[in-house]
Amino acid sequence: MASLSKAFVVALLIGSIAVSLVAPGAVASPTSPRTAKAVPITLYGSQSNGWGFDLNSISQPGPPIAVTTGDVITFTLFAADSQTHNLVIDLNSNQLQDTGEPHSDTFSSPTTSITFQYTANVTGTFLYICGLHGGALMRGALTVSAPTAPPTDNTLLIVAGVVVVVVIVGAGAAMAMRRKKPKQPPNP
């Protein structure tokens, strides 16, 4: 029985060594960080009707826009009513253009666009408004969500687990084989 215990201890020792060799620092790690996306958005503005993705979808409030933190939004802006407008990311949602809030240059053409680029670096729900006409009629919601966690790569942990199982099964088989060996009588 003592040799059986020794064999089991040796098998566990071999298994421990195998795991430490196969899986040094085997910690689940993210596969890669999320990269920011380029998000193109076309908006048509109208002082009396609001915002829309095209001339036929202008509404009040304007269409909701959803992005992820770090995304870079490129707005292509038209004035459906030929009035002068600008687009403001209203970070405090007070429906006014405040100092320091991101905003486009003015635009007034229904056929010639201007572009405005905004990097969504603050998580939350904000208004986008016309800074010249305020948010009473020309507003919509911009939701910036935190990125979801990337999947983790558990391959190394799985391999280490398989090695441990193989070593334990092998040790158990070796112990069973030793038990089945007939004992030879001692030599005279």
Image (cartoon, rainbow, N blue to C red):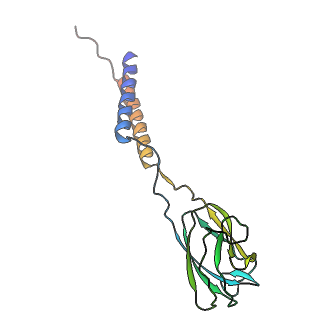
| Horizontal side of residue 119 vs 48, given as left or right | left
Q: Can you say which quadrant of the picture contains the C terminus?
A: top left
> How far across and how far down the image is residue 22, in percent?
36, 41
Q: Which residue is at 32% across, 17% downward?
A: 183
Q: Give above or below for 165 relative to 77.
A: above
User: Residue lying furthest left in this view?
Assistant: 188
| Horizontal side of residue 97 vs 105, given as left or right | right
The one of 55 and 133 positioned closer to us in this rendering = 133
The one of 105 and 39 positioned closer to us in this rendering = 105
Q: Which residue is at 47% across, 46% downward?
A: 28
Q: Which residue is at 37% across, 28% downward?
A: 13
The one of 55 and 92 positioned closer to us in this rendering = 92
Q: Give above or below for 120 relative to 46.
A: above
Q: Give above or below for 102 relative to 160.
A: below
Q: Give above or below for 91 relative to 176.
A: below
| Horizontal side of residue 39 vs 94, given as left or right | left
The picture quadrant where one finds residue 110 is bottom right
| Horizontal side of residue 123 vs 34, given as left or right | right
Q: Which residue is at 62% across, 90% downward?
A: 109
Q: How many tags in the picture?
A: 0
Q: Can you say which quadrant of the picture contains the N terminus?
A: top left
User: Residue lying furthest top in this view?
Assistant: 188
The picture quadrant where one finds residue 48 is bottom right
> How far across and how far down the image is residue 30, in percent?
47, 52
The one of 93 and 15 positioned closer to us in this rendering = 93
> How far across and how far down the image is residue 66, in percent?
63, 68
The picture quadrant where one finds residue 86 is bottom right
> How far across and how far down the image is residue 24, in percent?
37, 40
